[in-house]
Image: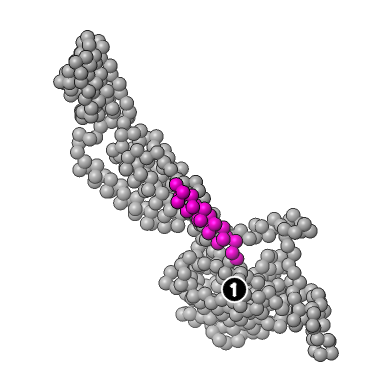
Amino acid sequence: MIWSRFSIAGMSVLIGVLLVVPSPALADDGGFTETFDDAGLNNWERQGDTIVESGILTISPPGMVTRRGTWSDIALTVKFRFGTSGFAVIDYHVGEGQHYSLTVLTGEMFLEKITADAQLRMWETTDVLVADDWNTAGIEFADDEHTISLNEEVMATVSDADSLAAGGVRLHVPADMGVEFDEVVLQAQAGEGIAPGGGEQPPGEGLPDEGEGAPTGGDDESTPIGGDPAPEPDPTSPGATSDGFLDDFFASQPANTELRTFAVNLVLAAFVALIIGLLYIHWGSSLSNRRAFAANFMLLTVTTTSIILVVRSSVALSLGLVGALSIVRFRAAVKEPEELAYLFLAIGLGIGLGDNQRLVVLLTLVMAILVTGLMKLIRTAKADVNLHLAVAGSNPGKVDLDQIVGVLEQHCSKVKLLRLDEAPELIDTSFLVEFKRFSDVSQTNAALKELSPTIEVTLLDNKGIW
């Protein structure tokens, strides 16, 4: 007990530390190199259909991955590939309500500046040759200039005096066919050099005079050399508006699951749970009320599916789930190993649907049905009974075991003796029996009563009659 308490306390502390420590995506100020060797896509936020396999990230429309940060002067290269048609979008300086967007189509490229108020196309060209194999798009942004390249060929240099604030990186496939990404390399400064909206900057200490060639810091100037960028307003501060706080709150929540996928998997979970319940009711051998126990499979499978759909792309939520389960331990009143096996089957199929492994789940369900049916066929016939029958008698008019068994064999298709307690004054027996019809129950009860007026008959449900 003491060791269990220390384990729970230690796990809770570890989870708290992991949740408080800043994400590596935000701490990596000097940039990053992503080769997609980690299928979990750590440090990235996923939305829509995104798959990592064999070091390749495949995004199907509409889908995206986002790496949050505060990078300003950047040198970004993205290696991508699509077939005869494709639509790859590379966003940078991604922040609340703002980003630059470089779009590459078959035979076309364009650069846009997107803010909460407007969407401005800054440059476009149709003189683009996208290779059938891997292509490398390059973006360099420094001193208010964007240098765009494709396969190491400079396509354009675009000026933007009213630069956006520093931000993160996003890969986006809004339409057409899926796009593969192999490598993303970002070299950058962290949050320096660019102020939101290109407005006037506060003077920094130690700045050179205008005569020494320092920027004047007017409306169209970037941040003075050596100066600090204007601080972002804190939405949680007393001076922040409630609208800004709500916008920031909901913008920071990763939308990792497409609603249609979520709904389809929940419907499949309900269907799978229904099949498992019918399988357990009709083919199970448990002595308890299987129909009542099977009703739990629906809620268990649907809940497991929804939990895995929510936490599968969030390390923080996954750790929170582990911490919650370590404190509130999962318990069920399991009387027989068969009940535990069906519980694990329901949970396992729910986890599979939560991870969007629909084909694996359906194949597992079919295999479970086939194996259970085969075991049902080879199971001994005398064990297939549907009711518990207890017969007791006492003096005067005590009956013996042979009389009771003789009556049961006349009206029951199967009889199995479980317990016999006999003394000179009384007899107490317990059987597992099978009745085909409800009329057989009344006939058996009447025949037993004819043996002795003091006899007592009790019937308990096992599988029931239907």
Coordinates of residue 456 in the picture (x, y in percent) = 28, 16
202 drawn magenta = no
The one nearer the camera, 345 or 138, is 345
- Above or below — where is 25 with respect to 452? below
Q: Mark 1 is on which residue type?
A: Asp
Specify how the rendered protein is coloured: one colour
Task: Identify the residue at image location x=62%, y=75%.
Answer: 29
- As helix, strand or loop, the secondary structure at mark 1 comes to loop
Which residue corresponds to the image point at 46% horizontal and 67% vertical from the top-left? 39
In this picture, is 309 found above or below 187? above
| Residue 19, magenta (yes or no) | yes
- Which one is in front, 375 or 418? 418
What residue does disc 1 label? 28
Residue at 70 percent of width and 77 percent of height:
192
Position of 255 with respect to 452 (left or right) is right
The boundaries of the magenta stretch are 1-22
